[in-house]
Amino acid sequence: DGGITQSPKYLFRKEGQNVTLSCEQNLNHDAMYWYRQDPGQGLRLIYYSQIVNDFQKGDIAEGYSVSREKKESFPLTVTSAQKNPTAFYLCASSLDAGPYEQYFGPGTRLTVT
Amino acid sequence: EDKVVQSPLSLVVHEGDTVTLNCSYEVTNFRSLLWYKQEKKAPTFLFMLTSSGIEKKSGRLSSILDKKELFSILNITATQTGDSAVYLCAVAGANSKLTFGKGITLSVRP
């Protein structure tokens, strides 16, 4: 089955700890994206990558970091510098950076207390 | 700054009703407008629109884009309880980055 997987589904962390969210795709897509969704806020872009070993900041990159060492994988680290990390995190991919639809993974719900 | 505004933010209808969901936008270097349906988890793709006046249709759902007036509508006819979801509108601008609206919560009552 082709698709995007995110793990874990639910994640709980103590304040001050870094945490890494996994995103893997086997669609052979070049472009990958991370979004954050808060109630009533829609989706906001954190980071995106159009090709391996390259990525750009989105609209709310502060307190987050990413890497793109493999085409299939785009992990997101939520650092202790992120002031309000509790949210629903969605990973997406598209064929390339052209005007193609983005396909989403099932999401990870992160709770930091 | 790119901007997407959806309206209404929520609505409640009865099964069999027809609904129209609105999306207006301001974006630099418009490339496409996309509609997604989100039922608690991952948004699922519905339509991508790039040209004005050409209706996209899938079953009871249809959508059209007006690039002159900068808006799109999503119509759902003969609504069913399974249509209850959040409907997201997004526009792709420079670098094909998507800017999302806040979403429209549709509740369809039996």
Image (tube, coloured by chain):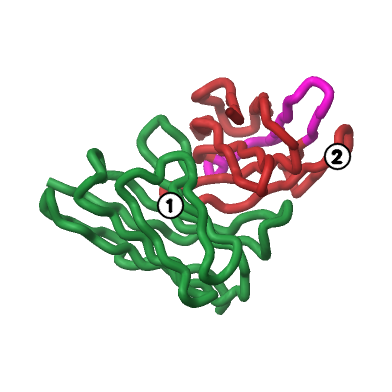
Badges 2 and 1: C-beta atoms under 8 Å apart?
no
Question: In the image shown, does B19 or A22 lie closer to the viewer?
Answer: A22
Mark positioned earlier in the residue sequence (2 or 1): 1
| Vertical position of residue A50 compared to residue B65: above or below | below
Which colour denotes chain B? red
Q: Residues within 10 Å of mark 1 (few under 14, many from 20)?
A: some
The dot on residue B41 is 1
Residue lying at 63% horizontally and 61% vertically, measured from the top left:
A94
| x and y, in percent, of residue A25 in the image | 51, 72
Give yes or no for residue B70 being in the magenta stretch.
yes
| Vertical position of residue A90 compared to residue B25: above or below | below
Question: In the image shown, does B51 or B78 lie closer to the viewer?
Answer: B51
Question: In the picture, residue B49 is in which quadrant?
Answer: top right
Question: In the picture, residue A29 is in which quadrant?
Answer: bottom right
The amino acid on which the numbered mark 2 sits, given as a three-letter code, is Ser
Horizontal side, residue A107 vs residue A71: left or right: left
Circle 2 is placed at which residue position? B51
Give yes or no for residue A67 being in the magenta stretch.
no
Which colour denotes chain A? green
| x and y, in percent, of residue B24 in the image | 67, 24
Real-space Cα separation, disc 2 to disc 1, in angstroms: 29 Å
| Vertical position of residue A20 compared to residue B16: above or below | below
Task: Report the span colored magenta.
Answer: B64-83
Chain that bears disc 2: B
